[in-house]
Amino acid sequence: MKIRQPSLARQLLRQLLPLMAAIIITGSGVVYFVAHRAATVAYDRALMDVSLALASQVETIDNKLQLQLPAIAEKVLLVDGYDKLFYEVIDPNGKTVAGNTELPRPATPFEDGQLYYNGKLNGKAVRIAALSSKHNGTSFIVLAAETELKRDWLAGEIVLAMLVPEGLLIIAAIFMIRRSIRHGLASIQPLREELVRRTHADLSQLPLKNIPEEIYPIFAEVNELLARLSKSLDANRCFIADASHQLRTPIAALQAEAEMALRSPEPRESLKNIVAGTRRIAHLAHQLLTLSRLEPKQTHAAKAVDLAELTRNAAERWMPLAAQRNIDLGFELSPAKVMGDPVWLEELANNLIDNALRYTPTGGIVTVRCGSNANQTSWEVEDSGPGIPDKERERIFERFYRLDITGVDGCGLGLSIAREIAHSHNALIAIEKGSNLKGALVRVTFHLAKRCCP
């Protein structure tokens, strides 16, 4: 079943739409507040005009306040096309002189002024304009009230006038985002077609012209990956070619010895040569397998490793060979701990000791040392062999590269493996002229970041 891939346009819209909606809702709230306030101020003034008109019709007859308002005037004054209007005239004693006795009265007393407040009449919200006035020295209060239909309608009209264009703006923004994304990603299409046309062997660089700035780093990294893959494949091809060449010679020699043994009436010597050749091929195969396992730069499971103990364990397996060749294999081991993979570090020790024993003449000396100071931990193998010339000390780490020394059997992979293991542990490996034994000295240096705490 085909998996539906996430859409970049939809992801952007999911992030933008809530923000746009929040902006619109907030803006609408602000506009509604401003519009409602403006409508309130305008209609409050008109309502106060009703209170003033009513106050002008109050007279004092027989020391009593009366509202002299003709019916026609009341009809004209209190008729509104939207809201219902109500009024009340109140004497100083709080008694109603005229009007609706159910109007809410001011919660706080006031004199010689105007007051606006909200209230409820028959369950409906009303806005009330209260006017404090006097006639012939007698004070009175006039209340003029109206329902709030006009105010709500005006505020709603203003908010609606804002929401409609903003809603259209959101719809336009959605289409523009989708269109812009498609247009922006259209420049990737030629690169996609380029990759479709390529074979698995074509690892050349991708063209980076007209790539949008936002996705340029992705294609730059792809080119970096292609470069690394190309380099790795070239190295593998060279490795396979060299390995094939190195295997061809001992296999041909082994075949020749086997054929000679078949024809010889005394095959004992040929059988000895066959056993030796088989051992050489097995050693070469082991070295090749070790290199192939080291090829991917995998992260080793780091543990605290005691180099002194590991060196003793590794050296024990080489003591019989050293004794057979009459080589003095000795140790100068001080406490030294690093963080690393004990299996690979033991392989490193095996290769360095094996290499030293191969190139040390009969009766020579090989010394293995380890120790540490405040900044680093070092691991050394020194021998009394012929040493390595300065110009060869870099090439000697290349695969299958061997010094032209007669009588030394090897495949040229030991130091290559040692370098790969050292680099995988962020350690440095170098070859110097030994100051004690005057032969070669191979030193592996582990810096503080890879050392183990004591």
Image: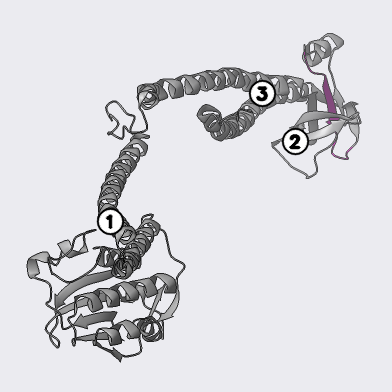
Count of numbered circles on the image = 3
Residue 269, image quadrant: bottom left
Q: Amino acid at mark 3?
A: Ala
Q: Residue 145 occupies which quadrant of the picture? A: top right
Disc 3 + disc 2, Cβ < 8 Å: no
The magenta-colored residue range is 82-94
In the image, residue 428 sits, relative to residue 434, either above or below, namely above
Mark 3 or mark 2, which is nearer to you? Answer: 3
Q: Position of residue 109 (x, y in %)?
A: 78, 44
Where is mark 2, residue-wise? Answer: 117
- Residue 344, position as x, y percentages in the image: 40, 70
**Circle 1/circle 2 CB separation < 8 Å:** no
Residue hosting label 1: 256
Image quadrant of residue 130?
Answer: top right
Identify which residue, 415 or 283, lies in the foreground.
Answer: 283
Callout 2: helix, strand or loop?
A: strand
The answer to whether 151 appears left or right of 235 in the picture is: right
Q: Residue type at mark 1: give it.
A: Ala
Q: Which residue is mark 3?
A: 155
Label 3 CA crowd tier, 10 Å (few <14, some 14–19, many 20+): many
Given residues 158 and 327, the one toward you in this image is 327
In this view of the protein, can residue 143 be seen by the observer? no
Q: Residue, x 91% and y 30% (percent of image)? A: 101
**Amino acid beneath label 2:** Tyr
Q: How far apart are the alpha carbons under marks 3 and 2?
A: 19 Å
